[in-house]
Every structure is written in C-alpha cells, then in structure tokens.
Amino acid sequence: MPRFLILPGLLLATLPLILAAGDGISSAELEEQEVLGHVEDVRLMPDDIPAQARLDTGARRSSLHARDIETFDKDGEDWVRFLFDDHDGGKHDFELPLEDEIEVTQASGQETRYVVKIGLCVADQYEETDFTLTDRSALTYPILVGRTFLSEGVLVSSEHDRTVKPGC
C-alpha cells in the first residue's frame, strides 16, 4: 500500500506531485519548489495588465472576468471581443481568436463559455494559456488560475497570499 507525503498547509497543484513513497522525488527537492499563495498578483500579456488572481487547484481550467462578450468574423475566422474588468478600476478591451466553445456544468445549470488564449505571468512562470470567459463580477478576483496552468510543479499554500510578484 503506497504511503503519501503530506505537507501541512499546502494544496498540491497537480496529481503528479502527490507523491507515493519511492517516486524518486526527495523531500529536499520538494523544499526547493516555489510555494505560491492561494491569491497572487499576476500579469496578462502582451499588454502587461496587472490583476489579482485566485489560484485554484480544484479547477481544471482558468477563467477570466469578461463583459460585453460578442463573437464576430474576421477574415473567415471566429473571433471574440470582450471587456476585461480588473476589479481595480481598469477596463481593458480584447479582440482575440476564438479557441473553443465549451459547456460548463455548475450547480445553477449549464453555461456555454467561449475560450481564448492569453499570456499569463504568475511569479516567474509565463505561458500562453486557455481562459474561459465568464462574468466574475460577484467574485472577489477577476481571474481564476486552474490546474492546467499550475501543472508545472507549482505548490499552492492555502495559508498564504501574494508571496511573489510577477517577474516575467
């Protein structure tokens, strides 16, 4: 029966980091991992837009607060335009290629969401990542960063927030 390494106060961002004894990763290597808080300052690229994000190891996808969402055709391709409200007084217009359209099931029912790809900087990690567009105005943070982005060995502490500035 495998034994698991439990780190008090830490939520591990990905299943590969839940370590059974003998996985070949030492506790010293774990100690070298950067620990991020459950809330971090981030930047959306390429426009270098500062915002606050909730790092959520329970969410697979990342989501972005978007208003006035509309799709349109641009040179035969599907695009989407929307307004990103950073919850700090900044309003940012985006026009991006539509990557996908997905159905999200929540307690309130099913919702269709558009997916766009945006550059995201958290700590010193940068990645072009998929975001679903949704109204997050009733939520504290305009961005939710999910496991897809966090899968590169990031540890998330539920006891901490704003542990590091974006350095991309």
Image (spheres, rainbow, N blue to C red):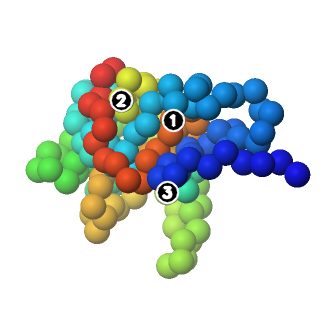
| Number of other residues with Cα within 10 Å of mark 2, as a class: few under 14, some 14 to 19, many 20 or more | many
Q: Position of residue 128 (x, y in %)?
A: 47, 28
| Number of other residues with Cα within 10 Å of mark 1, as a class: few under 14, some 14 to 19, many 20 or more | many
The amino acid beneath tag 3 is Arg
**Element type at marker 1?**
loop
Q: Which residue in the protein does label 2 denote?
A: 123
For marks 1 and 2 on the same chain, the one whose residue lies earlier in the sequence:
2
* Residue at x-position 77% and y-position 32%: 23
* Numbered circle sitting on residue 146: none
Does residue 52 show up? yes
* Residue at x-position 55% and y-position 56%: 58
Q: CA distance from mark 3 to mark 2?
A: 27 Å
The amino acid beneath tag 1 is Val
Query: Mark 3 near mark 2, Cβ–Cβ under 8 Å?
Result: no
* Numbered circle sitting on residue 113: 3
Q: Which residue in the protein does label 1 denote?
A: 154
Q: Position of residue 168 (x, y in %)?
A: 33, 20
State the residue lying farthest toward the top.
168
For marks 3 and 2 on the same chain, the one whose residue lies earlier in the sequence:
3
